[in-house]
Amino acid sequence: MNPDHSQYTIRPAEPNEVLVAARLICADDENSAQAERSGRFLLDYLRAQKLDLTWGVLIEQSGRSISACGCVESPGSCATLLLPHGPMEHVDAPAIRQAIDYLVGQCKLRGVKVLQCLTGPGDARQGVALTSAGFKSVADLQYMTLEMSNTDTRKAFTSSLTFVPYQSVSKSVFEEILRQTYLQSLDFPELTGIRSVEEMILSHQFTGEHDPNLWYVVCDPHNEPVGVLLLTRVPMQSQLEIVYVGVGAQHRGCGYGKQIVEFAVETARRRGVNGMMLAVDTRNRYAVRIYETAGFVSSSIRQVWVRVFVTT
């Protein structure tokens, strides 16, 4: 893994070096107190979701680790690439590219179908490295939050819809309505059909701290399934996350999305959590407006990069 022309050594982190890799991913100085806190938080956050830093790659210079990349593999044939959060000026592009190539190779060997990476605005060097490694920028992801203290507790929740716990319906019914919500979706349409419905369900279940009691099949007044609502607990925080809201293609335009989000907020209120969070494709202006109407405000934006591995 070490070309003769490079001044860097690129190598996989040993099991006892996972915290070192996490520190360097979270901060450019792995010996700082902030790096220690951030690195431990990252690992604890992953463990709370029954995940871990599947692969870490250390970038060394003169025998000292100066940066790192990592990858988190999740059930559902997907993985997330983690690039260093700190400035990358002190590491040349070929070194970062070599670390990315190693992690891409590991994902291929494991049968990962979708490898994603989130970068902050203005991360030009990361964008160059990802593009050269075969990634494609597909969209911007808008993170939104809601403080429950800012919601109107005097307003009673009413809806024409029925929210049925997903465990109360058959597996086939749940999978079929979920599949219908993906059709002509405005949320990352580039990824539609790459993974099976079963793989998507697995992926959703390993977002946050999964609680099956927070998953619902949404039915119209005629008791016909029209959509789904998937909520989860945010690890180590008093928050619920809206993992996914979907309405079947043939049922859109009826105002169901607004009612589903209102029910999600009501669920969070009844659970007594302090807040909610979600992430939405910025191109889905209809969904963004619904969330804004419900009181959600934008907290940050990340650029989504994806590399898809074709399997046969």
Image (spheres, grey):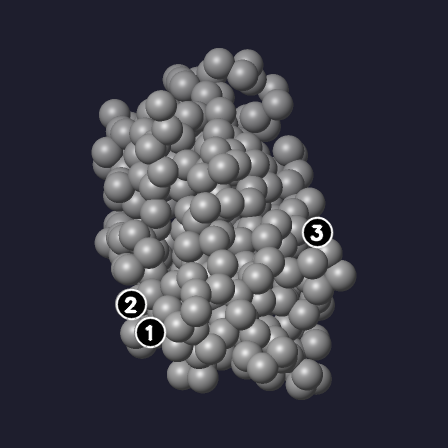
Q: Amino acid at mark 1?
A: Arg
Please give the residue where the numbered disc 1 appears in the rendered image.
125
- Which residue does the image show at 44% across and 49% down from the upper left? 104
Please give the residue where the numbered disc 2 appears in the rendered image.
128
Q: Amino acid at mark 3?
A: Ala
Please give the residue where the numbered disc 3 appears in the rendered image.
48
* Element carrying mark 3: helix
- Which residue does the image show at 63% across and 67% down from the upper left? 22
Report which quarter residue 73 is drawn in: top right
Instruction: Check contact, mark 1 vs mark 2: CB within 8 A.
Output: yes
**Mark 2 crowd level (few <14, some 14–19, many ≥20, 10 Å Cα):** few
Measured along the vertical axis of the image, is residue 265 above or below residue 185? below
Give the camera-side residue of 204 and 273.
204
- Which residue does the image show at 51% across and 45% down from the upper left? 106
For marks 3 and 2, the one nearer the N-term is 3
Q: Amino acid at mark 2?
A: Val
* Element carrying mark 2: helix
- Which residue does the image show at 65% across and 34% down from the upper left? 213
Give the camera-side residue of 206 and 248.
206
**Mark 1 crowd level (few <14, some 14–19, many ≥20, 10 Å Cα):** some
Asked if residue 119 shows in the view, the reply is no
Instruction: For marks 3 and 1, give the one nearer the viewer.
Output: 1
- Where's residue 84, x and y in %? 50, 71
Side of 170 where 289 appears, left or right: left
- Where's residue 71, x and y in %? 53, 54
